[in-house]
Image (cartoon, grey):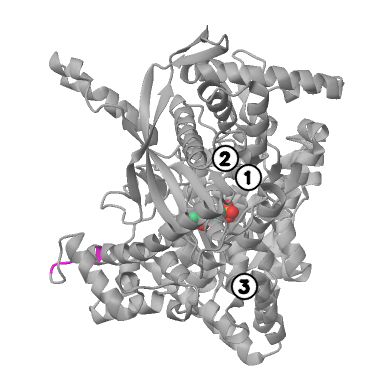
Amino acid sequence: MSQQNNLDHPKLDLHSRTGTNADTLQRAILDNLFYIQGRFPDVATPHDWYQAVAYTVRDRQLHRWVKTAQTYKKQKSRSVCYLSAEFLIGPMLGSNLVNLGIEDEVREALSALGQDLDVLLEQEPEPGLGNGGLGRLAACYMDSLATLEIPAIGYGIRYEFGIFHQRIENGWQKEISDQWLHLGNPWEVPRPLLTFRVNLGGHTEHYTDDHGNHRVRWEPERVVLGVAHDTPIIGYGVNNTNLLRLWKAEAEQSFDFEAFNTGDYYAAVEEKVKSETISKVLYPNDEAISGKTLRLEQQYFFVSCSLRDMIRIHLQQEPDLSNFHEKFAAQLNDTHPAIAVAELMRLLVDEHHMDWNPAWSVASRTFSYTNHTLLPEALETWSLPLLQQVLPRHVEIIYEINMRFMDQVRVLTHDVCGAVTRLSIIEEGEPKRVRMANLACVGSHAINGVAALHTELLKKTTLNDFHNLWPEKFLNVTNGVTPRRFLLLSNPKQSKLISDRIGEGWITDLEKLRGLEAHLDDAGFREDWRRVKRENKEALAKLLKERTYVDVDPQSLFSVQAKRIHEYKRQHLHLLYVVTLYNRIINNPNLSMAPRVHILGGKAAPGYAMAKLFIKLAHAVGEMVNRDQMVGDRLKLVFFPNFNVKNAQRIYPAADLSEQISTAGFEASGTGNMKFSMNGALTIGTLDGANVEIREVVGDENFFLFGMTAEEVVHLKTNGYHPRHYYDGNAELRAAMDLIASGYFSHGEADVFKPLIDNLLEHDPFMVLADYEAYCHAQSQVDDLWAQPDLWTRKSILNVARIGKFSSDRAIREYCEKIWKVQPTPVD
Ligand SMILES: *Cc1c(COP(=O)(O)O)cnc(C)c1O
């Protein structure tokens, strides 16, 4: 690992208590083991040691953190508040060591104590506070904000149970609850004094105060407490340490004494249990809405706590809230926090007695909104009666916002083609519904999509009426990922190879990777590049063997699709191709082909039957293919269980081929595509999401493109799509589908995969069959290139050399310049 040593770092002010040389670290680790955990080396478990190291690292973060808070306060910096229901931060120890630049010293200190850092890193449970791409994006952005020295707070929910742990039983997914807090969380600092009371339910009372002002009082049915839990987020090679502030729900009183005194013990604790439920568990649906009361309560709960925390911070420095928007830029990560628009209005008008118009001016200049989806089933709406029940005051406020907005719209549009109805925050129907995307658009000064294609489609389709109304509000910020976690930390060998050639500047300026192009013609460099990939594949092969008992040959082409399981992502297209290869071998036992290992991974939402069936199919096909003597090492199919950040860090570096095969127009951006490319995989993909821009920068000759464009998808759909036509017209497709339908992979039980096959033949909503032939063709181009290893290596190097754009640092710089208008505040 390329390391920078903080002792050489002029910016860091070290003193002995939190020093970072190996001797001081060793002392500190022992102290923490003893004084925090009450353990001593003879009896300490690896987990005890992990925690002792974690506390040692946290101590070193805390002193930078205090310094950071002081600096931001003194400079009165404008802060970014990133509001997100999910932060999929992943394990912290590794990335904190990298960002502090003390990995080598900690390793040395531990080896003097007879401990191996790599073993201890494995001890850390994953904080799975997100489903997939959206939550991981928020985590990458926190890393970049700190690294770019931007004052920022991430606000979210401290779920007691994060995303479920995926176990596979007989090929089916089983969800196991995730007890990540079970053994304690050394990274967080609970702030019991930083607590807000959050109202829920009840009714409102309108009255006139002593000065003749119209006022509203919300008489809630119940109150829950939101308690802050802070996790320091340190930037790479800087002192700036920002805050991830997550809210935990607690009961107002832990006992209802009246019930208790009358002897009803269980009724007495019921309220406590009910309150704490709010932050109990993450909803495990990616790209789908739940519509459940509890989900709405979660959203309101964290938004209310966060906004009131911002107001608290603001009033420490300023006399009133009239310039609140100058001090804070609040980003809505999708519509999950969109109720913030109404809540800030309530706080300003009802609680801080601002007039409506200035309050609206403040609110709408505070918020900006990132849209993450074009899928209609993922566009959040809440039934009005439900909203009324949970947030009666907010319904009034939303009506007020909407009435004023509708008046404005009528003047501006003269209601051309019914635009007024479509723009309305309230959707007519039985019952009426509140459209959260519309609320977010109306209440924000900027609206962005997450890749160029996605933003264009937003403007043309999903948010077309808003775009016609306010074209100037729309802009694109293509997603990015942090090269610290997803290259430096997770792929130390490739990182070292890069740094040996071009220095370490790429770590904070990823465009510098372009310097690698100058080494393209160096045969020794290409040789090293191949060796590193081989070693990463050997490591993954070993892990696959441990987790799945399948043997794979690291010489084979590793083709990987690892992401949430969803029909639009088309894992079934990938599986149809694997079955096609299998058929080819059966029909021609002497077939000479590039040996391939196909690796799938990803969780299915627990209620998403079709996605769960994909997982079963992957296992069923794998079971037959992997043990077929005739196939040998030419083809393997492995499902890597429990895809999470920890596993992702082992998978991305070992991929030769990245499968990014969603139906064009459905993947907003994708970030997995960027991580694979950064780690030297070539992509086989459609013109969807950020694939379009990845192909643009790496060069179309270094990318395996296939499939319909988003336009062609729409065109085909509107002109009548007949999947059976493709089935009838392609013998290999027919053979693959027939083999699955025959029960060959399911012990003769033809019923098991019938829903999948029927769905493809009758509806095929994501046009798998239409793209099948083009996909197979692109896969044979992959084989052709694989047969020329040196050419493959060149293209792999070029993918990395040109991937700089997809650093989350670039994305955050764009947000800072175009939306948030914030400047760095360095901490010395
Ligand atoms: C990057 C990442 C994702 C997003 O992957 P996509 O391919 O963009 O869907 C999901 N889960 C984890 C754990 C990730 O690291």
Label 2 amino acid?
A: Glu
**Vertical placement of residue 89 versus 403, above or below:** below
Residue bearing mark 2: 287
Magenta segment: does it hold 670? no
Label 3 amino acid?
A: Leu
- The kind of secondary structure element at disc 1 is helix
* Whole-number angstrom distance, CA of label 2 to CA of label 3: 41 Å
Q: Nearer the viewer, mark 3 or mark 1?
A: 1
Q: Position of residue 65 (x, y in %)?
A: 42, 58
Residue bearing mark 1: 568
Label 1 amino acid?
A: Tyr
Q: Position of residue 185 (x, y in %)?
A: 31, 53
**Vertical placement of residue 191 versus 591, above or below:** above
**Vertical placement of residue 298 versus 617, above or below:** above
- For image coordinates 34% across by 75% down, the residue present is 106
Q: Magenta stretch: dominant SS? A: loop
- Indicate left or right for 3 with 756 as reference: left
Q: Nearer the viewer, mark 2 or mark 1?
A: 2
Label 2 environment density (alpha carbons within 10 Å; few <14, some 14–19, many ≥20): many
- For image coordinates 75% across by 66% down, the residue present is 697
